[in-house]
Image: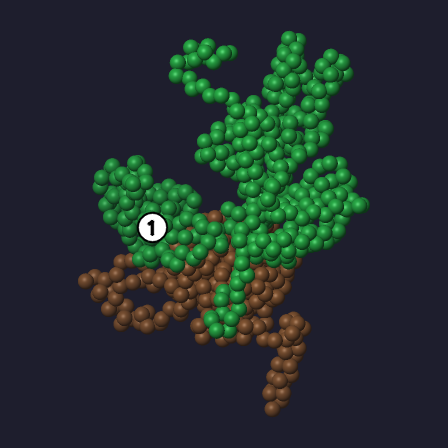
Amino acid sequence: MRGAENHSIIEALQEQIRNLEGGKGHRRAVLPFGIEELDRRLPQGGLTLGALHEVAGGGNGALDGAAAALFAAGIAARTRGKVLWCVTRPDLFAPAIAQAGLPPDRVIYVEAGDEKSVLACFEEGLRHVGLGAVVAEVARLSMTSSRRLQLAAERSGAIGIAIRRWRRQVEATDFGQPTASVTRWRVSVLPSRPLPVPGIGRARWQLELIRSRTGETLDLEVEACDAKGRLALPSKLVDRPAQKEIGRRLASA
Amino acid sequence: MPATKAKALVPDLIVMDAEPAADADALDRLALWALRRYAPVVAADPPNGLVIDTTGADHLHGGEQAMLADLVARCGSAGLAARAAIADTWGAAHAVARFVRRPTSLVLSGGISTALADLPIAALRLPHEIVDSLRVLGFERIGEVMALPRAPLTLRFGPELGRRLDQALGQLAEPIDPLRQPDAIEVRRAFGEPISAAETIAQYIGKLVEGLCRELEAKGQGARRLDLLLHRVDNRIEAIRIGTALPVRDAKRLTRLLCDRIEKIDPGFGIELMRLAAPLAEPLFAKQTISSLIEEPEVEISGLIDTLSNRVGEEHLYRFAPVASDVPERSVRRVAPAAPNVGESWPDHWPRPARLLPLPEPIEALALLPDHPPASFTWRGIRRRVRRADGPERVFGEWWKRDAELEAVRDYFQVEDDGGERFWIYRAGDGEDAATGSHRWFLHGIFG
């Protein structure tokens, strides 16, 4: 009885905090991943729309940002409307983005000269009502600039994804600094599941939710985006010994 | 030299009558074209030049160097052999464009005196007599004249020499009398008392834009380019140019685009006249946008495109579109962000890397020929063992595009190392025939 009472008090307080934060106090729309284990741990059951999210790659991914870009493309693919992608280095390969579910007609790229103008374009995009998602590849993200971005996103309702990508490995420690973003993810590549035949299977990622405002952190192994931008959980079935045997037999046949 | 003598010297010389009036007309037409295309302040500089004030307009063309290259290339394709130069002053640009043997030159701020020092005195736009008598005295270069005391020079040659030198060095103002389009839509506002505060300028920009939009509406047109010319009390003209992707008549949007660039204006001692013109306008008709009967349309984003392209430059804002080519670096092309949807994507038989290196990087690889993936490779000093691999995906050279690719072949492999990182590598050549490539290995992309 007492526990239930406490629970309701906590909920009331949380509601009060949300009112203070969100202005009008309405619950924000979310974009679920469609994976039960992931959505359950996120506040309100998905990625908050109209908010800033951060993604970085783990290991060498902090420099090339390849997996992080695909992760962001998968999220952007599941929104509605055009997507603005701000870069400083034009090394993104559009066919791969299309394979993550984002067709070329939907993405507008901005190639800005330096970090400062990337952030300016990012904010300009987030301020504009009608975009589905705004993605930007940035190295440094200060508390002030992330706060600006977050406020801009709250007003327009577009999802903002900052892909943190550095030029040197030592700079990647910057990822520990606090920012105003709602969630912070790290995507690291994992060896793919062995196939029964020579070749490479669907890519697998270690997905870490390092920080989540009003939520818990998370560490999950997922399969990379499919052609619709959806992640998947690796199925346990194939790892069963019997199945493995079949696989081996098939491979040797 | 009489024409008969010239013909005797060069047998197949083509002789035509000089037509100064027609030349001047053609120069004016060229100036008008430059006005529409490049910058708001343009004037003909007879007999053979144009003068363009690029301040506040180069951002639309990707910077000064790109703008010069574009200008010269376009003149070249129209059959005009052009040379162009940008400098801080009209005099310096005039001299460098005519006396430096390069199609485009850029004189950095503060580098005028060094750039001019080596040029002949004739580059200073002086009458023949002065140039000749200076040569008689032994002066050939501008640098030699610059080093002389001014008073004896003026005593001997009159004020013209000193004036031209000062104009070239920027010590004396030389206003450009801008060409005006006869049929352009234009509104203007003169101030009794010069204005200079940013807020005041913004306020009057708003009023001018409203006036311009009314005129545009009366003609059924929308602006593609807007020029704001601010005449300062010291007889200089500050200019801002903005461009839009689609014709626009929305006063709020145009005001915002212009006000974004207010910080580029140097009001000096004050602005006494503001002129807003639309040198490029296209038909724009009212259309119904919201109807409950049809599906909710996608939100219009041309406003965002305009804001961003005025900030980073038009060619830095693009969409990718597929090209039917197997060679990866040629399979994408850039299209304008507001271009109609292409509606198709790339074929997805094979996975493609998220990052494509600008140039394939050579790697050291150990592999069985002809069609096995490498067992290990070394990239940027790190040796990686290949755990799993997929391929080869053979890409043939496009001999119809380049002769050198007649027999060229690339075999692409997707490889995964111990840590799970995936790379896109290829071997130049088919592994058997040396004519198809060097059989060296390259890393071309990184999968996520």
Q: Which amino acid does label 1 sit on?
A: Ala
Occupied quadrant, residue A245: bottom left
- Chain letter tied to green: B
Residue drawn at (62%, 39%) of the image: B180
Quadrant location of the C terminus of chain B? bottom left
- Residue A96, placed above or below residue B177: below
Q: Residue furthest left?
A: A253
Q: Identify the subunit bearing mark 1.
A: B
Residue drawn at (42%, 46%) of the image: B357
- Residue B380, placed above or below residue B18: below
Nearer the observer, B435 or B275: B275
Nearer the observer, A164 or A161: A161
Q: Is mark 1 on a helix, strand or loop?
A: loop
Residue marked by disc 1: B324
Would residue B414 appear left or right of A231 to someone viewing this image?
Answer: left
Nearer the observer, B127 or B372: B127
Q: Residue furthest top?
A: B136
- Residue B177, placed above or below residue B396: above
Would residue A146 appear left or right of B294 to someone viewing this image?
Answer: right
Residue drawn at (30%, 55%) of the image: B390
x, y percent for residue B191 = 77, 46
x, y percent for residue A26 = 61, 76
Residue drawn at (42%, 65%) of the image: A229
Colour of chain A, in one word, is brown
Q: Which color scheme did the rendering employ for the protein?
A: by chain
x, y percent for residue B425 = 35, 48
- Residue B43, placed above or below residue B296: above
x, y percent for residue B102 = 51, 27
